């Protein structure tokens, strides 16, 4: 028997089934997951679907990569003395092929505060994952 989900949960399940999500859809879904509205089964279903990796549109990917590069390079291309990246992350950023949503991580052990986890990957398969906490990058994989 098929599971029954609320209309709102079903809306996000249907979006995730496409394998793509827009920035606005992601923000709305994140708000839903962090609220008291979904059942634990609905929340688990959405988190499980996201963990398979969800494509971001090219404009959203570029926006994210540009922001990441600004964290370690000045506008004239010089590497900043204090930046959050190691050599692996810099290599991946300099040679990136795709960026995608790889999950949501709960950043608060007492309340729900699920935040997007993004992965950046090269054609060769080198990658790293990160999330944002308090506006700062947190490399998590």
Image (cartoon, helix red, strand yellow):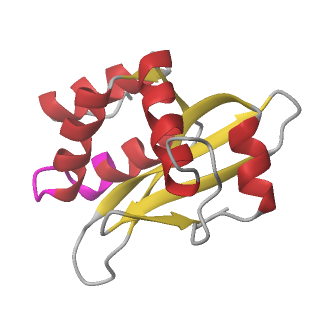
Q: Is residue 2 left or right of residue 99?
A: left
Q: Residue at x 18, y 37 (%)?
A: 28
Q: Residue at x 58, y 67 (%)?
A: 84
Q: Is residue 16 left or right of residue 113?
A: right
In depth, the one of 31 and 75 nearer the eye is 75
Question: Looking at the figure, which quarter contains the N terminus?
Answer: top left
**Vertical relation: 85 (above or below) 64:** below
Looking at this view, name the residue that lies furthest to the bottom.
Answer: 110
Q: Position of residue 131 (x, y in %)?
A: 47, 58
**Vertical relation: 112 (above or below) 99:** below
In depth, the one of 79 and 98 nearer the eye is 79
Range of residues picked out in magenta: 35-42
Q: Position of residue 74 (x, y in %)?
A: 53, 50
Q: Position of residue 125 (x, y in %)?
A: 84, 37
Question: Looking at the figure, which quarter contains the C terminus?
Answer: bottom right
| Magenta span includes 133 | no
Q: Position of residue 101 (x, y in %)?
A: 50, 39
The secondary structure that dominates the magenta segment is loop
Q: Residue at x 79, y 47 (%)?
A: 91
The image quadrant that residue 26 belongs to is: top left
């Amino acid at each position: 028997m098929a599971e029954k989900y609320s209309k709102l949960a079903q809306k996000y399940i249907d979006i995730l089934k496409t394998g793509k999500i827009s920035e606005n859809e992601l923000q709305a879904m994140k708000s839903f997951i962090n609220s008291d509205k979904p059942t634990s089964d609905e929340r688990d279903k959405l988190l499980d679907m996201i963990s398979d990796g969800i494509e971001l549109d090219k404009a959203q990917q570029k926006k994210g990569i540009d922001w990441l590069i600004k964290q370690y390079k000045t506008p004239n291309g010089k590497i900043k003395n204090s930046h959050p990246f190691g050599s692996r992350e810099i290599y991946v950023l300099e040679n990136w092929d795709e960026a995608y949503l790889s999950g949501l991580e709960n950043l608060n052990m007492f309340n729900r505060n699920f935040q997007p986890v993004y992965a950046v990957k090269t054609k060769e398969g080198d990658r790293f994952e990160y999330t944002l906490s308090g506006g700062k990058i947190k490399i998590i994989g």
